[in-house]
Amino acid sequence: MEPQRHPLPPFTMETALQKVQAAEDAWNTKDPEKVALAYTVDTEWRNRTEFINGREAVKQFLTQKWKKELAYKLKKELWGFRENRMAVRFEYEWHDAAGQWYRSYGNELWEFDANGYMQKRYASINDLEIEEKDRRL
């Protein structure tokens, strides 16, 4: 059995903000092993048009993501929460191997288990080509 991952649901404003900040901090490490530890072993994801099931598949997905999305920098913002669920908006910037910069915008829906692990993550994301001079993050 895995240890609890605080803060635990049901969330308050304070603990929801803590959970979002912890996710932002973890994703900005670009460490698939570290990031994947926040999810249940059997986590369910929809990321854009991909369906990803299980912590091991999450690690593989993130490894490939950060090979493509170079100089990745993310900012998350709590949009709303209720009991064990959250809605989060985010944006991140990155460039591809050819040097083209992007700002990716999106919304995520999160559901947590009783031990504080994310069991469901549904992400809708759009990419906007930007000039390097227009970066904000």
Image (tube, rainbow, N blue to C red):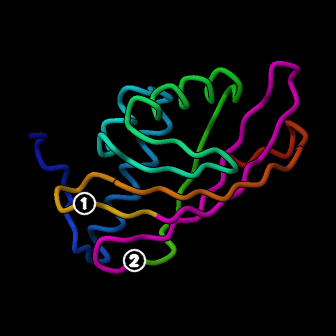
* SS for dot 1: loop
Total count of labels: 2
Q: Residues within 10 Å of mark 2 (few under 14, many from 20)?
A: some
- Horizontal side, residue 94 vs residue 21: left or right: right
Q: Quadrant of residue 132?
A: top right
Q: Quadrant of residue 98?
A: top right
Q: Which residue is mark 1?
A: 113
Above or below, 40 relative to 13: above
Residue at 87% in and 40% down: 133
- Horizontal side, residue 83 vs residue 123: left or right: left
Residue at 50% in and 65% down: 109
Q: Quadrant of residue 21?
A: bottom left
Q: Which residue is mark 2?
A: 81
* SS for dot 2: strand
Above or below, 32 relative to 40: above
Residue numbers of the magenta segment: 81-109
Residue 90 circle label = none
Residue 85 place in picture, x, y as percent: 37, 71
Q: Is 93 contained in the magenta span? A: yes
- Which amino acid, mark 2? Phe
Above or below, 116 relative to 10: above
- Which amino acid, mark 1? Asp
Task: Decide which of 121, 133 is in the foreground and name it.
Answer: 121
Which quarter of the rendering shows the C terminus? top right
Residue 17 place in picture, x, y as percent: 36, 66
- Horizontal side, residue 110 vs residue 84: left or right: right
Residue at 68% in and 50% down: 48
Q: Main secondary structure of the magenta part?
A: strand
Residue 80 place in picture, x, y as percent: 46, 78
Residue 101 place in picture, x, y as percent: 83, 35
Q: Residues within 10 Å of mark 1 (few under 14, many from 20)?
A: some
